[in-house]
Amino acid sequence: MTALAPSSSAPDLSYLLDHTGHVLRTQMAAALAEIGLTPRMHCVLVHALQGERTQNQLAELGDMDKTTMVVTVDALERAGLAERRPSSTDRRARIIAVTPRGAEVARRSQQIVDRVHREALESLPEEERTVLLHALRRLAEGHLAEPVETPGAVRRARERAV
């Protein structure tokens, strides 16, 4: 005798958020690849342009672990878009400084990011866009603002190769 799977009494919010987030990330990655950037590279460039920030501060802003951040900054340096420099306030720390070429690439990449976001939102009727953005902001700033401590680490959804 087989047990029947329990029926769900609520929409599968996890699936909806994970799936749409994954597809949006793949669209973003493909669009940024056209100018030789990854979403992480874009993130580092844009945040580094906002002020003197250390590699650790940028990693936190971009939600990257230290290893991923080092690999990302290495790639930016190889491309001539950023460089590590001593911090003016902490001689032990290194800041990520964006080169003039990196600043131009960051402007272009921000236009790409804005376009990808705009296209996703424009696929909805305007009134639904407004409701969606309002609801997501409320969740992000309220009930889903902070992760819950768990006994075992909860892994983020792995990006699948297409």
Image (cartoon, rainbow, N blue to C red):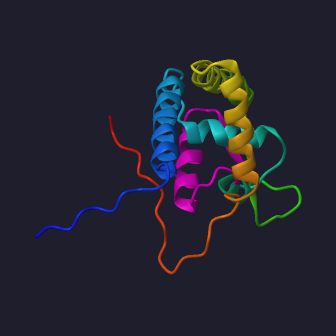
**Quadrant in which residue 6 is drawn:** bottom left
Residue depicted at x 70% and y 59% = 143
Residue depicted at x 60% and y 46% = 73
- Farthest left residue in view: 1
The C terminus lies in quadrant: top left
The N terminus lies in quadrant: bottom left
Residue depicted at x 36% and y 57% = 7
**Looking at the image, can residue 101 be seen?**
no
Residue depicted at x 57% and y 60% = 65
Residue 69 inside the magenta-drawn segment: yes
87 left or right of 99?
Answer: right
In the image, residue 137 above or below residue 133: below
In the image, residue 133 above or below residue 34: below
Residue 10: image x %, image y %? Answer: 49, 53
Looking at the image, which is closer to me, 124 or 25? 124
Looking at the image, which is closer to me, 139 or 110? 139
